[in-house]
Image: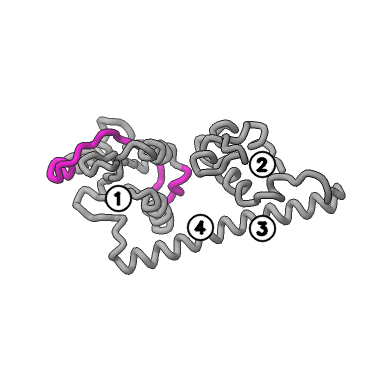
Amino acid sequence: MADNRKAVAYLRTSSGTNVGPDRDSEKRQRAAIQRYARRSGITVIEWFNDPAVSGADPIESRPGFAALMDRIEGNGVRIVLVEDASRFARDLVAQELGLMALIKRGVRVATANGDDMTSTEDPSRIMMRQIAGSFAQYEKARLVDKLRKARERKRKTTGKCEGRKTYAESDPELVAQAVELSQRRPRLSLREIAGELARLGRTTPRGLPYSASSVKSMLTG
């Protein structure tokens, strides 16, 4: 059950010169979040940080944010605190895509001045989430189409048209998800990709995580 008195906090510093507990940016962010938490009766149980990461970098490529996502999935915490919206992301599309990922998990993102970034009452935010969602769907469709064309080229070259279907042929969306996970930074191992797929509900017909060799087949066609 979600506990509205507990939260995790997210910090981001865009410059390497601001990295470290004694640096102004991180200290300022921590102080602002702690003040808001005290006023609101919230306990910050864990801190996540992406040092020297640009605000325009995609949310899914940030190791600190990835760790935050892993932490909130299953521990009951449904509040993420940030100093302000720019700490979450400066690029609006990156920001909204990240917020959409949290909203789907029932998570609320609040800034140190009390703004609810996940509010569904702001028409402009609703519009941006629709645009961001359309962009994400376009990227997914583009990747699936790219894989389909690659299969067609391979078929023309090798003449393969019968036999057991590849993952790309039988489940192109699964392959697209595996490819997206393989592009994360820091790079995930094949077993870690299998674990992430399982957390997304993508398992074998027997309900087990895919093996490392299966993930390799997805990535290599």
Spatial CA span between label 4 and label 1 = 21 Å
Name the quadrant of the C terminus.
top right
Spatial CA span between label 4 and label 2 = 21 Å
Mark 4 or 1 closer to N-term?
1
Horizontal and vertical percent position of residue 96: 39, 56
Q: Name the residue under label 1.
A: 108
Please rate how many residues cluster around mark 4, counting C-alpha atoms within 10 Å: few if below 14, some from 14 to 19, many from 20: some
Q: What is the span of residues highlighted in magenta in the rendered image?
A: 35-61
**Res 3 quadrant in image:** top left
Q: Mark 4 points at which residue?
A: 136
Residue 56 located within the stretch drawn in magenta: yes
Spatial CA span between label 1 and label 2 = 34 Å
Q: Which amino acid does label 3 sit on?
A: Asp
Q: What residue type is labelled 2?
A: Met
Residue at (46, 60) in percent of width and height: 133
Between residues 72 and 31, which one lies in front from this camera angle? 72
Res. 50 in view: no
Mark 4 or 2 closer to N-term?
4
- Which of labels 3 and 1 is toward the front? 1
Q: SS at mark 3?
A: helix
Residue at (29, 65) in percent of width and height: 122
Q: Name the residue under label 3.
A: 145
**Res 30 quadrant in image:** top left
Q: SS at mark 1?
A: strand
Horizontal and vertical percent position of residue 191: 57, 31
Which numbered tag is attached to residue 218?
2
Residue at the far front: name it. Answer: 206
Q: SS at mark 2?
A: helix
